[in-house]
Amino acid sequence: MPANPSGALPGDPRHGLNQEQLDRYYRERGPSWIVHAVLRDENGLEIADSVMNEHLEYLRSASDQIRFAGPTLGGDDESKVGSIWLIDADDRAAAEKWVAAEPFNEAGAFSSVSLTRWSSSMPIRQGEYARTQGWKQFAITAYDRPDGSERRDAVAAAHHAFQATVMDRYVARGPMLTDDGHELIGSFMIMEFPDREASDGFWSREPLNTGGVFSEVRVDSWRYGNALG
């Protein structure tokens, strides 16, 4: 069994953990959650705009439990079509309670809201990330196939070697997990590139993608929200 089974690089809290330690790390660390919300087609943006001040204040008041927060964008990379927030919460019930009280959601701006448990592989939060002026951000949500674990193992070395070449492009990254934290179900990351073509080029070379690990992949144009700067 490899000494560093996660393949994590120095600076990642999983670096150097053996398999038993890695399993315990995922079970015991405080969970984070990916909140992906989609605005209603007809009047979702208008509803959101009407409670924008309340929304900003809500996020700022909870800044200590928010890792990243911002809107997802349409094909023009400008118009808002939803939100992705990465929040810390003890369990799904606590995350659902937080989302239920969020002003956009409370006002009925969203047509759908999903929650997925996630474990951050990076310690930084939104206000700490060194951004590249003029570059764009892309949120990639990838769900594993039923045999994803075996396929991950097959391309693990290639994935970690490739990952080392693009470390400066990750804004956030980490595995998606079942609610109890016991099973890996996919990967989530926010990347920063000059444009969508560069983002697509990255994904076309990622060994987890080319190795057929995923059954479903969604790439959302995203940007930093105003609440956290």
Image: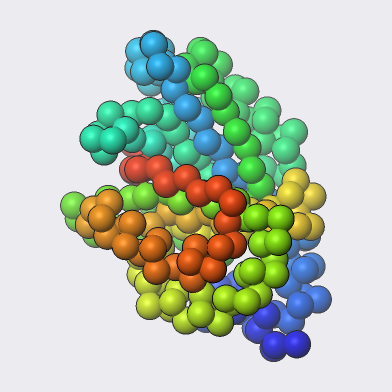
Does residue 87 appear in the picture of this structure?
Answer: no
In this view, the residue in front, 45 or 160, is: 160
Residue at the image position 75 percent from the left and 87 percent from the top:
1
- List x then y, in percent, for residue 222: 36, 42
Quadrant in the rendering for residue 18: bottom right
Residue at screen point 65% across, 55% down: 145
Residue 52 falls in image quadrant? top left
Position of residue 89 relative to residue 8, above or below, is above
Q: Quadrant of the C terminus?
A: top left
On the question of residue 185 being in view, the answer is yes
Q: Nearer the viewer, residue 165 or 107?
A: 165
- Decide which of 91, 181 is in the foreground and name it: 181
Is 72 left or right of 21, judged from the image as shown? left
**23 vs 151, nearest the viewer:** 151
Q: Is residue 119 left or right of residue 63?
A: right
Question: On screen, 145 above or below 10?
Answer: above
Residue 35 on image: x %, y %: 56, 37
Q: Does residue 98 appear left or right of residue 78 in this picture?
A: right
Residue displayed at 74% across by 42% down: 91
| Image x and y of residue 13, in percent | 60, 72
Residue 167 picture location, percent across and down: 40, 72
